Image (cartoon, coloured by chain):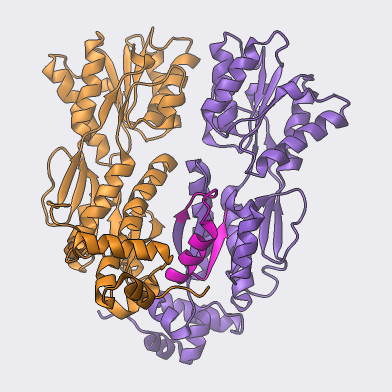
Chain colours: A purple, B orange
Amino acid sequence: MSKATIKDVARVAGVSLKTVSRVINNEPTVKEATRKKVRAVIDDLKYQPDMSARNLRGNKSYAIGLVYDNPNPYYVVDVQEGVLKACREMGYSLQIHPCDAAHDGIVQELCDLVNNSRLAGLVIAPPVSENEAITNALAEHGIHFVRIISASEPPKGKAPCVYVNDRAAARSVAEHLIDHGHTRIAFLSGEEEHLSTPERRAGFKEALKAHGISVDDSLVLPGAYSFDSGFERATKLMERSDRPSAIFGCNDEIAAGALAAVKTSGLTVPGDVAIAGFENSPFSQHSRPPLTTAAQSIGEIARQAMMLLIAEMRPQALAEGEVQTTTAEFVPELIERPSTA
Amino acid sequence: MSKATIKDVARVAGVSLKTVSRVINNEPTVKEATRKKVRAVIDDLKYQPDMSARNLRGNKSYAIGLVYDNPNPYYVVDVQEGVLKACREMGYSLQIHPCDAAHDGIVQELCDLVNNSRLAGLVIAPPVSENEAITNALAEHGIHFVRIISASEPPKGKAPCVYVNDRAAARSVAEHLIDHGHTRIAFLSGEEEHLSTPERRAGFKEALKAHGISVDDSLVLPGAYSFDSGFERATKLMERSDRPSAIFGCNDEIAAGALAAVKTSGLTVPGDVAIAGFENSPFSQHSRPPLTTAAQSIGEIARQAMMLLIAEMRPQALAEGEVQTTTAEFVPELIERPSTA
């Protein structure tokens, strides 16, 4: 059997070529009944639009680039799957572009990426998305993009953006520790160029202040989003005579490292020291005891980001009312587990 | 400053357009001195070949698809980075295609992927790569691909292939346990459709036999490549009066789950039960105690696979002698850690 063409689809469905094309491109100017009929014929005939030919004919690109600089494979794969889910729904392919956010030539690199691979637009994850020098330059080059960032209120600027309210969620985690009687709580930060670090730390401090607990700066420690960094800092904390009764890791890897350090010091969790993390990664689920954390739906955040990008690039592709704004907020939710019980 | 063109590069380097083109396409018919000079000018002028235009002019594609069905983010990200490294060296972009290996329409899905996105070829990871019905069908459709598989000898067939000798490595892990005096060793399998499972199990059994230890089939348990599956199986093993003195998990997640189960049962590791895993993932490094395992260089395996694919698709792109065969073998190496000490 030879491959079905768009003409076959139009003939069998009894509609014009243009109507089939509109259905394929998800344009909203097609009646729902017609759309369903054409979709059914497309499935029946196993017709597949040739994306490449579509690109040439329409002078439009249907490839998206995903830009990230994150050492956490769980985060990376969840973001990829969320973006890819929306890509598949909307007929886009996905190119990945891990990069070095601190590289001098990053703006040129991303412009070249878009031009050389003829990308329709970029989905940009933290921390690249949180560097305004980079995103402003991309906007000046006329590149379509959507950002995923950490923020406690809608960001300024016209570019579409999904913001994760880490601050509110970190406040909940800290309040949970305070509710369990802790007043000496250490906070182990991640890298500062990830806005999630200052945002989560701000939420932590806000919770302390709201409960009349003064912040002991000697318990708020800089570091990196890694198991080893959590282990090292917690080991030193456990050697102190005024050691904290609780540790809040800026992510689950830090918290898992802190857990290992506390246990290695001969202390118990949560008996001697309560520990909480952030992100609900497998690190928090598989630790013994499992870690209290805050869950962020990375996949859904990424999918939503891709839909905002499409709304920006090709508003006619979305049904009316499907995406009404250029920003969307997500608030991670506290998950209580035995590490703080 | 307007963007440099290929003509600018040719003029500044004092060579023909054709020579610049050959350098860009990594063709070996250029003298090394000329190649260096042209590369320097390309860097100086920040010239970037337009991949899209290149695709149209040469009727060649410079996009690769990476196909996988693996729930382990560490594996997925390492494979992506390895393939991407070779892609960047050789001027290709990378599209990702996670899929369901068991899906009925997988062959059609992959053919459509290649045709619709005009991919030059596919890098296929386990278990899709290990399903001959799929790969034979792809070969019949004339699709270029390279496979990454688990095997103890070079695979038959013409398609390029990187094979990981899991059997030899599993033999080393088992012998390490035997050397430490263990004769009752449980083996916790992963999914059977991953050839790594039967291969690693075969290596385990070979080691027992070589040391005159009979295999107790009640200790060789089916299951899945997951923490939970390791936890469940080890929990049951610990309840047996004839419990094993050692557990070999088919990967580190299984082993980490087994470790949690043994500790939950009130037993110690390695005092009461020694535990070994496989893959040297962070699960093995971050467990307490850290787990003995076998290290596979997934990134290098994936990079090598991409180079074999290029050698197959475009032999002129590689310098002579750079890739001499269509297969390459990798043998994971034993890493001894406290969980078996």
Q: Which of B10 and B24 is in front in this view?
A: B10
Q: Is residue A341 left or right of residue B117?
A: right
**What is the tally of numbered marks visible in this picture?**
0
Q: B212 above or below B19?
A: above
Taking the spot 79% from the left edge, 24% from the top edge, the residue there is A178
Q: Which of B281 and B271 is in front in this view?
A: B281
Q: B170 above or below A106?
A: above
Q: In this view, does A36 lie to the left or right of A49?
A: right
Q: Is residue A115 magenta?
A: yes
Q: State the extent of the magenta-drawn residues as a range.
A: A97-125
Q: Nearer the viewer, residue B217 or A46?
A: A46
* Residue A138 in view in this figure: yes
Taking the spot 20% from the left edge, 68% from the top edge, the residue there is B142
Q: B97 above or below B204?
A: below
Point out residue B292 in the picture as x, y percentages from the top left corner: 34, 21
Q: Does the magenta stretch include residue B245?
A: no
The C terminus of chain B sits in image quarter? top left
Q: In this view, does B227 lie to the left or right of B110?
A: right
Taking the spot 50% from the left edge, 16% from the top edge, the residue there is B264
Point out residue A69 in the picture as x, y percentages from the top left corner: 52, 48
Point out residue B44 in the picture as x, y percentages from the top left corner: 41, 63
Point out residue B274 in the picture as x, y percentages from the top left corner: 35, 14
Q: B14 above or below A232?
A: below
* Residue A88 in view in this figure: no
